[in-house]
Amino acid sequence: MARRIYARRYSQTVFNIALERKELDRWQSDLKKMATVGQDAAFIALMENPKVGFEKKAKILSKLLGDINPLALNLVYLLATRGSLSMVGDIAEEYQRLLDSYRG
């Protein structure tokens, strides 16, 4: 339950940023890419392991997702740092729901 609430908060914030910057489609694409990476359980375990330093996590994430919006990459870094990277799929789903609602 709490996970879904956090995903909604993140997605609402992302949606507001995307709307303000007129980057709705770019964020949609970036979140889908992030969600794909977030489906690998072994990868998530590595990224959420507190023994793995941020620098190593950032290097791996940058290599995998380097072509996404810098703010989207910062979101991934934040989620990895907080041990919440597994939530990225939920965030992408909530963002899509908001986008669909916005576009009617």
Image (tube, rainbow, N blue to C red):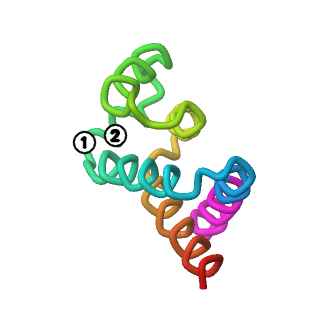
Q: Secondary structure at mark 1?
A: helix
| Residue 19 screen position, x and y as percent | 69, 57
Residue 94 lies left or right of residue 20; in this view the side is left
Foreground: 39 or 103? 103
For the C terminus, give its image quadrant.
Answer: bottom right
Cα–Cα span, label 2 and label 1: 5 Å
Q: Which span of residues is magenta-colored?
A: 1-13
Farthest-out residue, front? 22
| Residue at (69% x, 47% y) in the render | 21
Q: Is residue 94 magenta?
A: no
The tag on residue 45 is 2
Please, is residue 20 above or below residue 73 in the view? below
Q: Secondary structure at mark 2?
A: helix
Residue 97 lies left or right of residue 89; in this view the side is right
Please, is residue 20 above or below residue 52 in the view? below
- The amino acid at mark 2 is Ala
| Residue 13 screen position, x and y as percent | 71, 55
Q: Is residue 8 magenta?
A: yes
The tag on residue 42 is 1
Foreground: 42 or 98? 98
| Residue at (29% x, 53% y) in the render | 39
- The amino acid at mark 1 is Ala
The tag on residue 77 is none
**Number of residues whose C-alpha sits closer than 10 Å to that of mark 2, classed few (under 14), some (14–19) or many (20 or more):** few
Contact flag, marks 2 and 1 (Cβ < 8 Å): yes
| Residue 43 screen position, x and y as percent | 28, 39
